[in-house]
Amino acid sequence: MAETLETRGHDPLEEIAMLALEFGRLLMEAGASARHVDEIAFQVATGLGADRMDLRVGYASLAITIGIGADGISRMRKVGPLGVNQSLYRALGDAAARIERERLTVAEARSELENLVRTSAHHPDWVVALAVGVACGAFGRLLGVDWGGVGPIFAAAAIGQMVRRRLALHGVNAFISTTVVAFLASTLCGLGARWAGSQTVATDMTAAVLLLVPGVPALNAQSDILEGRPTLGSARAVWVAFMLVFITAGMRLAQGLLGDGH
């Protein structure tokens, strides 16, 4: 009777493939580039006993093929909305390195992954909002706004971030959310800047929506294209371009309302 994978001391290929895909999915949703998703999934698959692994990274899905000896299996998995979570990203990389180094079983690796996701640190929403307000105010100064505009930028950006978070938790479409937050932040900032006597109201309103600029996706789009993944890179670039269009739409609506359009 031919030996099975289990009798040779390996975990089933199905379990290895699905766990590697789970790592890949979480990495994509945390803002990882395709190269890092590929590298970390490879660490997981080989650490669990696979001899080889091929991963196709798409914008909304992942497809993996792994093999042990003459046996092989291919599986796919859907990827959710892409965001940015650097602490989870780093933790996933550390966990994959440990799986590869210590040759954990699938059960041990899955337990570690579940614990990692459950205990992954998240800053309170109010801390994030304050940080966003400070960042936008600082960028405003770099863009040349006067001191009268810094306070309104800070307040409008912080409120915009809180609203953005609430909309995300309720599953609102990212483009609609972007337009709403851009309009709200620009309007609040414009009103506050006028009240504070700022002479740079138009620039103040622009600085208040910088929290919406998709910096990480834009960098990933560039990296993916330069690293030989033009399809994924182009998809990310199109998403970035549409985000900028909706940011601009929200700002223009606010400028039209306040009479500050040019």
Image (tube, grey):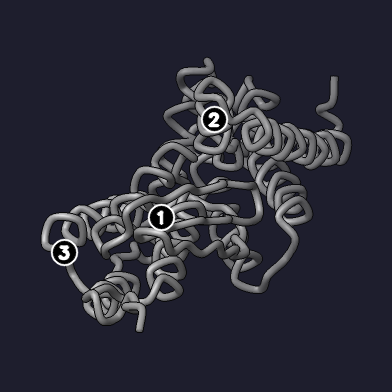
Please tell me the numbered disc located at residue 128: 1
Measure the C-alpha gap from mark 2 to mark 3.
30 Å
Residue 244's quadrant in the figure? top right
Q: Residue at x 35, y 84 (%)?
A: 1
Q: Position of residue 261 (x, y in %)?
A: 84, 26
Mark earlier in primary sequence (2, 3): 3
Please state, as top left, top right, bottom left or bottom right, where the C terminus lies in the image: top right
Disc 2 residue crowd, few under 14, some 14–19, many 20+, Cα 10 Å? many
Q: Residue at x 44, y 44 (%)?
A: 32
Mark earlier in primary sequence (3, 1): 3
Mark earlier in primary sequence (1, 2): 1
Query: Going by the picture, which residue comes out furthest to the top?
Result: 144
Residue 46's quadrant in the figure? bottom left
Q: Mark 2 = which residue?
A: 224
Q: Position of residue 120 (x, y in %)?
A: 30, 67
Asked if one can make out residue 224 in the rendered structure from this viewpoint, the answer is yes
Q: Nearer the viewer, residue 118 or 20?
A: 20
Disc 1 residue crowd, few under 14, some 14–19, many 20+, Cα 10 Å? some
Q: Are marks 2 and 3 in contact (CB under 8 Å)?
A: no
Disc 3 residue crowd, few under 14, some 14–19, many 20+, Cα 10 Å? some
Measure the C-alpha gap from mark 3 to mark 1.
37 Å
Q: Tell which tag, 2 or 3, sits nearer the viewer.
A: 3
Q: Mark 3 = which residue?
A: 103
